Image (tube, helix red, strand yellow):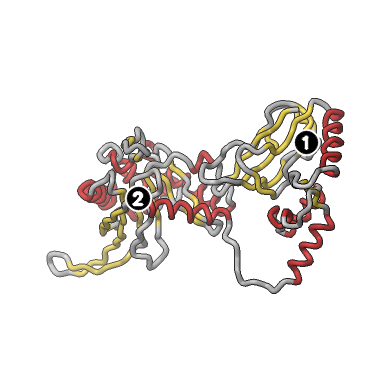
Amino acid sequence: MIGIELPTLNTNDSSYTLVEWLVPDGSSIEGEEPLALVETSKASEEIESTGPGILHVLVGGGQDCRPGQTIAYLFESAEERDSYRASAATRATSAPPGAELSITNAARALADRHGVSEAELRGLGRTVIRTADVEALVRRAASAPSSPQRRLSKRQRTVGAVVTESMRTVPAAAAYAKVDVGQAEELARQLSERTGSFVSLPVLLIKAVARRHAAHPLVFAALTDDGTVRESERAHVGVTMDAGRGLYTPVVHDAAELSSDRIADLLTGFRSKAFRGTFQAAELAGANIMVAPHTTEGMVLATPIVFPGQTCVISIGAVDDQVLLDAQGTPHTHRFVHLGLVYDHRVVNGRDAMALLKDVKEELEAPVALG
């Protein structure tokens, strides 16, 4: 008998959700192959078998599970599995007072369907929970007065924990720059027509920020627990993204080495995954700076948080048309955005922050190198 343990998939979570088993309970497994789909607060990951055997599921689909928990066994034969099941059933029916809670498969499925938590089942004071026990809880809940309260999702609770940790540990300061993006918008239009990719101002901003990695290493650095600043070798730019299923921060790795249209294609794929909630953990890991687009019409600027483990985040607002007079007094319409830079003042000083904003502003106002 070999146990299949759930690995640590996300250091921010103490529990995950086992979404579904990709093979039926009792199936014969030939070797290393995907067995189950597990969802963290950020991504979905497939759990693979550790070898051949007969699958015996311990944790049903839709249930919460924790890192290190054994979610299934692989038996050498069907006979060995049947023997285990028989002994497990005997232990469940003869468990002494105070023994670990045992829930029948039918009862667990019913509890999952109606959202009955394990804490509620433990509150019944039984060692073995059967379908009738769950049905009684469901009837009791149906007869209780309705409540306007709504429980936060696991993903939203994780986002809240990150924000709280940032505000608790990062002495943040902020600076802002006003950027004329008329030429950048024209370049984005030309690139979109030529490549067929959706090149936008956030795409050019990612490229511009990444190109300044060598000139401003501290804004891509990380502060370790012992007070050491660890600089990065390459620019890995995270992008905040919310398509209605919660906040995600996918990463454009080696962004300085990529063309703008390649970055655009990556963002398009990220948006699709944000909408479906199908990110893989590797796509959300490794950022050393963050870009936060706040380009909804009418949004002038934003002050995002610095993610713990990073030193800087830069935001971009929506385009704002302004009429200015040239040297001859002739009015011309200019297209502006505001960039907001929030930085960890333990690592980055105001002078460094201003220098980065100045360089990014110059990149966007004369964007030839971004093509």
**Label number found at residue 170:** 2
280 relative to 304 in the view: left or right: right
Q: Which residue lies furthest to the left in this view?
A: 328
Identify the secondary structure beneath mark 1: strand
Query: Which residue appears at 72% of the width and 57% of the height?
Result: 123
Q: Nearer the viewer, residue 304 or 213?
A: 304
Give the residue at x 49% y 49%: 268
Q: Quadrant of residue 1?
A: top right
Disc 1 residue type? His
Q: In this view, does 336 lie to the left or right of 257?
A: left
As drawn, is 309 to the left or to the right of 174? right
Residue 43 position, x and y percent, is: 56, 46
What SS does tag 2 mark? Answer: loop
Q: Write the residue at 29% across / 38% down.
A: 217
Which one is closest to the eye, mark 1 or mark 2? 2
Residue 45, picture quadrant: top right
**Is residue 123 visible in this depiction of the protein?**
yes
| Percent position of residue 310, x then y | 37, 44
